[in-house]
Amino acid sequence: MTSASTRAAAGRTPAVGALLRRNAWSLGLMVFLFALLAFTKAINHNYDATGIQNLAISILPLAFATVAQAIVVISGGIDLSLAAIMALTSTVAAVLMKGQSEPFAILVVAGVLLLGLLIGAVNGGLVVVTRVPDIVVTLAMSYVWAGFALLILVRPGGGSATWLKEILSGSILSEWIPKAAVVLVVIVAGTWIPLMRSRLGLSLYAIGSNRLAAFRSGISVGRTRLIAYMLAGFFCALGGISLTATTGIATPVPGPYTLNSVAAIVLGGVSLAGGRGGIVGPIIGVLILQLVRTDMTFLNFNTDLATVLQGVILIGVVMIGSLLEIRRARA
Amino acid sequence: MSGSAKNPDLHAALRSTGFRGLLRDRPIVPLMGLLVALTAVIYLARPEMVTSNWAINIVRQAIPLSLLAACQTITFLTGGIDLSVGAVASMTGFLVATLVSRTGLPAALAIALVAGCLAGLITGIGVGVFRVHPLIMTLGMSLIVLGLANVWQRIMVQTGAGVPAQLRWLGTETLAGFIPASMLVWLPIMLLLLFMLSRTGYGRLLYAIGDNPVASRLSGARSWQVIVVLYVLSALIAGVAGFLYAGLTNVANVNLVDPYVLPSVAAAVIGGTSIMGGRGGIGGTILGALILTVLGSLLSSLGFPEATRQILFGAIVVLMAAAYTRFTGES
């Protein structure tokens, strides 16, 4: 009786503690983000709602790429072809939308999202069927997708529907709530929350955490990996569309999104070994990476030193993370 | 990504006579066949192209690529990867070209190699001591090296840069009519690596750590020391490759070697080194680099545009890796 009640009492306090501990990394990042925002305001007094709106628009492509990378890495893989898929989907969208009517663009967007799923299915299918390591398959496929982008468009061009541009620019309700941020939150939450409540979401974590154990508990490992890559392709297509929408054109050359997405998920607390992490941390990671870059322009920082600093931040964050992990393992 | 049982005794026991066994135990033989087949295809398509000059040119281009691929091979063996070879190699070539006019060639070469070693040392400490994932550590390190090289470029902008004549000789000249001069540098390095991997305790430790990190730790291997030395060695080889690339192209540029990073990974994979660690060797890697160079020559000789070449290159790399995995039953 007494032991049961103490256990219950003990169980309640750790519940809060466990919740805090489980989200400690995201909370820490959030604090860091606000400190960074305060710092930005301090060095540039003109930084206001417009700055926030620009921030929301500029992070959009990387944020989608990061969600894509997070899903694949959580399932125990890695996708080095993200930037190439984004270049391809962005080019397809821009070429198809140029000079067409506004309603037609809805069809284009739907078609490009399907294309993203298809590309992801090719990547995932190859990884599953050939059993070649993810890193090798996606690295080689990045050539293929970038090549297709170059076939479609030799130099930057194409166009974007007006409604697509308007859906992302400006603010809604209050000038402090950028439309781009709302779009991002609605799309990501709209896929992530149902996913996490489904068997599929659990399977993604399971195969990333221990593939053999997942297989023996009856999860179809191959199918789950395939779906992870398809979801990644879908989010890459969203990233590609947002590239076209925010710039008005498409560039057939892949941007730096693959590397930066890996940086953002690691910063956001996703373990590269798979099976651990979420989606909120990586998106905060994207915000931090972008804000650091903005601050460096405000401070008239040499862009080359900014590159160095980016590398130092990337390595530093991962080092701290792995040191914490080593200490936790010893304790 | 579970490591399968890969211990040498088991391999010896499994050593079979069929094609499978041949591919697993002597990957060199089928790779030779592939190389000959590719050359035959070129000969059939463009008979006038296959001359001794063509062959010398292929070897000349494959030499620096195989050095970069050797960096991948030795890091793959421990389950790592070195994506900083591009930045390090570009940096060493650039440093020599900017320094040679004021310090003389030997000092310039020494300074460049020391700078490369320093980058390798930091990478090694990050991977070995702080257990940062090698992918992240080397990507971050390439950002740092690239940024610093750009800063250096800005400082040296008045001096101007020129690739010293000796390096140009090394990169482009031919000895006795058919031996590329770069062989003088390449051969000792490769012989040393072959000796290291097959005859020394250090080489065996590399295989052991990649095969089973826990077992190697329990048998007394100080894996962090092995790994620090490994990444310094990798940076050194990349540095030498940088000299050869600068000599071959007569260009001093901080991004010169970047396009060869992915081919270097592909060459090591095609050569039969497992990216998961514990299996592979230098011989296959050299053939892998030759095969990729011949493949590139084939694709450009067929007159395909850049985009199609990229697509075919990526697809063929996936196919080769898939065939390899299928026949050996390992990944």
Image: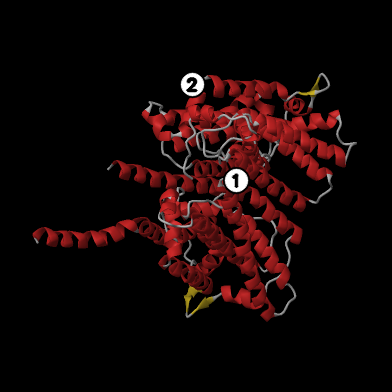
Tell me the residue that label 2 is attached to. Answer: B201
Q: What kind of residue is marked 2?
A: Gly
Tell me the residue that label 1 is attached to. Answer: A136
Q: Which of the two residues, A316 or B196, is positioned nearer the viewer here?
A: B196
Secondary structure beneath label 2: helix
Q: Position of residue A194 (x, y in %)?
A: 44, 70
Q: Chain of mark 2?
A: B
Q: Which of the two residues, A305 or A238, is positioned nearer the viewer here?
A: A238
Q: Quadrant of the C terminus of chain B?
A: top right
State the separation of the CA atoms marked 1 and 2: 29 Å
Q: Which of the two residues, B78 or B110, is positioned nearer the viewer here?
A: B78
Question: Is residue B92 in view?
Answer: no
Q: In the figure, B265 relative to B189: above or below? A: below
**Does A160 sit left or right of A225 as displayed?**
right
Q: What kind of residue is marked 1?
A: Val
Question: Is residue A58 in view?
Answer: yes
**Does B110 sit left or right of B167 as displayed?**
left
| Label 1 environment density (alpha carbons within 10 Å; few <14, some 14–19, many ≥20) | many
Q: In the figure, B229 relative to B34: above or below? A: above
Secondary structure beneath label 1: helix
